Image (spheres, rainbow, N blue to C red):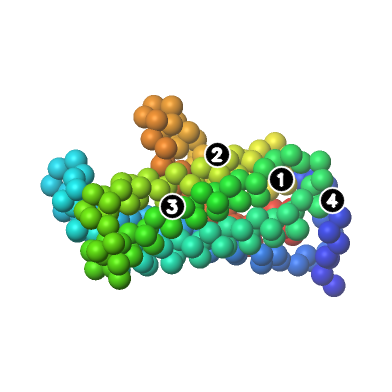
Amino acid sequence: MAYTDPSPVDGRTGWGEGPVRRAYWPLAGAAAGLLGGVATLALDLHLGDLDNDTDTMTIDQVGEVSATTARLSFLAGYLAVALLLVTAAAWRRHVEPRVPGSTAARVVPAGLTASAGALMLGYGWKGAMAIYGDGGPEDTAFDRQGQYVYFMLNDFGSFIGWLGVLIAAGAVTWMSLRERTISPWLGWLSALLTALPAIGFLVMSVPGLPGITMPAWMLITFLGLTYGKSTITR
């Protein structure tokens, strides 16, 4: 008989003997990471569709942005936002009652929610580019200078919003390596993928670095929570 008692746990005592029921709610977080990676990186408007002979982006490049790419990125991004909110709600329901003394456990859904709010804007600007850019249904609504505003907003727009997830990853690091309620390998992974953008902040002051590592963190970590042996999900 599977053990389903949602009573508090900690990493030192675990769940006791007997089989346990696997938790599948973290798959929403893994899907958010996958879709976020596609929307932010694979469909980045400033990489795949521009002829970048120089490092300088100019107003003339606005016309090179694919409205189709912008639309696909917008749709994938908004799905990722929805899944971030679902994951935050599921974490509050399933994890927080089991670790009532953990502040870090409450930081995780707060970070995911903060990112969801910011990414609504980041991916929304991609949707605007799909509408107002060349080939969009309202591509005559703004002149080239107006289109260029959306072009510039999309430079870091869908990258900056991942900062909240970076903070959540830091909290998972603490839960794993200090509180021992999450598998150690997830803690070390979280520490690495959190440290890389943090070092970049200090050295280069680039605000969009979380968007490079955090989608992968979401995908791997929440798959690990589903199929691994963390006490908060077993």
Residue that label 3 marks: 122
- Asked if the residue at tag 2 contacts the one at tag 3, i.e. Cβ–Cβ closer than 8 Å, the answer is no
Q: In this rendering, which labeled residue sits more in front, label 3 or label 4?
A: 3
Q: Looking at this rendering, what residue extends furthest in the top direction?
A: 203
> Residue 92 vs residue 36: left or right?
right
> Residue 229 vs residue 118: left or right?
right
Q: Earlier in the sequence, mark 2 or mark 4?
A: 4
Residue located at (36% from left, 29% from top): 204
Instruction: For marks 3 and 2, give the CA distance.
Output: 26 Å
User: Residue 107 versus residue 115: which sits nearer the camera?
Assistant: 115
Q: Earlier in the sequence, mark 2 or mark 1?
A: 1
User: Residue 202 versus residue 194: which sits nearer the camera?
Assistant: 202
Q: Earlier in the sequence, mark 1 or mark 3?
A: 1
Badge 3 marks a residue whose secondary structure is helix
Residue located at (43% from left, 52% from top): 122
Q: Which mark is residue 191?
A: 2
